[in-house]
Image (cartoon, grey):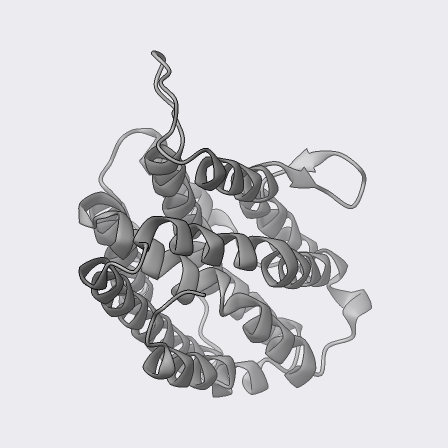
Amino acid sequence: MIKIEISEITKKQKSLENHHVFSVVQNIDDLRVFMSWHVFAVWDFMCLVKRLQRDLTSVESLWVPPDSPLAARLMNEIVLGEESDEAPDGSYISHFELYLLAMKEIGADTRLIENFIDLIRKNMPVEEAMKTLSVDTHIQNFVNNTINTVVNGNLYQVLGSFVFGREHVIPNMFKGLLDAWHIDENDAPMFVYYLKRHIELDGDEHGPAALKIIQILTKGNQTSIKQLTSSAIDAINDRTALWDGMEKAISRGKTM
């Protein structure tokens, strides 16, 4: 068992899972706004994934054995699913690219996120890229905090953000969205596929794998556990602030 005091984490996760933003997504216009915001969280999630892959596996040209073969195996399985999952047509695609296809399917504007990715490809710093494109400040704050953890956090802080701020909470969040909205699934089939795929993977495979990685690495070390827990709470608070801003944007029909 993982000896982590999770009562505060669990309480904050429940609040996040039951956030009112899900109940305000009532039509395709609302969903377009939701997705134009949420796509940035889909992107920076991959940054957490790749940081953990770097730390837990060997990705350098001069290979050396990983410290924990089991943690490396579990992490590589997560990367496989997130970066090259099976698409509905049988091809392979990252979940980020799948999300872009889902956005285009419902007519959501993808120009902002695509321009952002172009700037990142040109090695513009994340914070500067978002400012250049005038991305909403709620999104900027969320992404900047994630990237700060990715770049400056230690392994346990990154794990806390990844596991309890993302993998462990995503299935119930996405179930909440599907339960609360009044949109016909046939009107957004690719997005529904994305949601259900994450509910399946994160709930049955990636989430348990991530918890196992924590168990392998912390080994009951209280300093590591404290760092992990603090980072997890910060990540959940950041997502709550993002949802708060998104709810207001949807309610006033704002697009970016």
Q: Decide if residue 188 is in sight here.
A: yes
In this view, the residue in front, 191 or 31, is: 191
Front one among 92 and 201: 201
Quadrant where the N terminus is found in the figure? bottom left
Q: Compared with residue 140, is residue 121 higher up or lower down, i.e. above or below?
A: above
Residue at (38, 28) in percent of width and height: 66
Q: Position of residue 44 (x, y in %)?
A: 39, 50
Q: Is residue 50 above or below residue 105?
A: above
Which residue occupies 30% across, 63% down? 142
Can residue 131 be seen here?
A: no
Give the image quarter of residue 126. top left
Q: Residue at x 52, y 69 (%)?
A: 34
How many numbered tags mark residues here? 0
In the visual, does 53 lie left or right of 141? right
Query: Position of 90 compared to 74: left or right?
Result: right
Quadrant of the rendering where the C terminus is positioned:
bottom left
Residue 190, by quadrant, is: bottom right
- The residue under the point 62% across, 54% down is 205
Question: Where is residue 48 drawn, in percent x and y?
Answer: 37, 48
Q: Looking at the picture, how far across and down is residue 55, in whole percent?
A: 32, 36
Q: Does residue 99 appear to the left or right of 57 in the view shown?
A: right
Q: Position of residue 213 (x, y in %)?
A: 43, 50
